[in-house]
Image (cartoon, rainbow, N blue to C red):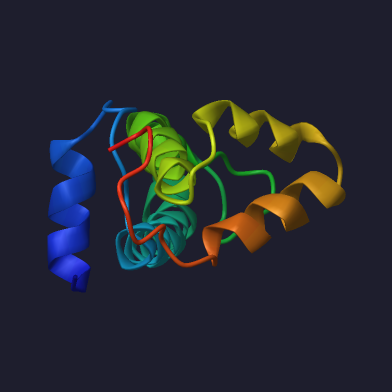
């Protein structure tokens, strides 16, 4: 699965929490989100901040574009993470372990890099 195909797949399953997401699908989506957030923050700092009356790249300037994009893509991010956990045979509820400081994020990261279960599991 390539970059464009992964993005299309995740966006076409905008709020689908069932099924499975392969490792490449998840990580290409993660990279796309990272790039998009950097770009929107640069636009916020260089273009939108002066419109709102702040200096360019001022710390106190708001980031309305970044916030809107983040809110719009929050649901597909959670959905693809849930489907990725399904792909390794875990319930999507394991996402909540991310609220445990440091250890929770490390456990999720470990699970996200695991290979897919080769056979069908209870999630598809």
Closer-to-camera residue (51/40)? 40
Closer-to-camera residue (81/49)? 81
Q: Is residue 116 visible?
A: yes
Number of dots carrying numbers: 0
Q: Position of residue 45 (x, y in %)?
A: 49, 56
Q: Position of residue 122 (x, y in %)?
A: 38, 33
Q: Is residue 65 visible?
A: no
Left/right of residue 68 with respect to residue 7 in the rendered view: right
Question: Residue most toward the front?
Answer: 119
Left/right of residue 6 with respect to residue 17 in the rendered view: left
In this rendering, the answer to whether 105 lies above or below 32 is above
- Residue pictured at 46% horizontal, 67% vertical: 115
The quadrant where residue 29 appears = bottom left
Q: Position of residue 37 (x, y in %)?
A: 43, 56
Q: Position of residue 102 (x, y in %)?
A: 85, 51
Closer-to-camera residue (31/43)? 31
- Residue pictured at 45% horizontal, 35% vertical: 78
- Residue pictured at 37% horizontal, 43% vertical: 80
Please identify the quadrant where the C terminus is shown. Answer: top left
The quadrant where residue 69 appears = top left
Closer-to-camera residue (82/55)? 82
The quadrant where residue 4 appears = bottom left
In this rendering, the answer to whether 102 lies above or below 113 is above
Left/right of residue 109 with respect to residue 65 in the rendered view: right
Please identify the quadrant where the N terminus is shown. Answer: bottom left
């Amino acid at each position: 699965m390539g970059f464009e195909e992964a993005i299309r797949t995740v966006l076409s399953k905008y709020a689908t929490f069932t099924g499975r997401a392969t490792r490449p699908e998840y990580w290409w989506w993660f990279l796309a989100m990272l790039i998009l957030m950097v770009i929107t923050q640069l636009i916020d700092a260089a273009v939108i901040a002066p419109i709102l009356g702040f200096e360019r790249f001022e710390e106190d300037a708001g980031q309305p574009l970044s916030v809107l994009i983040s809110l719009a893509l929050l649901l597909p991010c959670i959905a693809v993470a849930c489907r990725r956990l399904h792909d390794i045979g875990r319930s999507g509820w394991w996402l909540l372990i991310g609220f445990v400081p440091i250890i929770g994020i490390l456990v999720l990261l470990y699970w996200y890099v695991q290979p897919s279960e080769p056979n069908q599991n209870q999630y598809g």
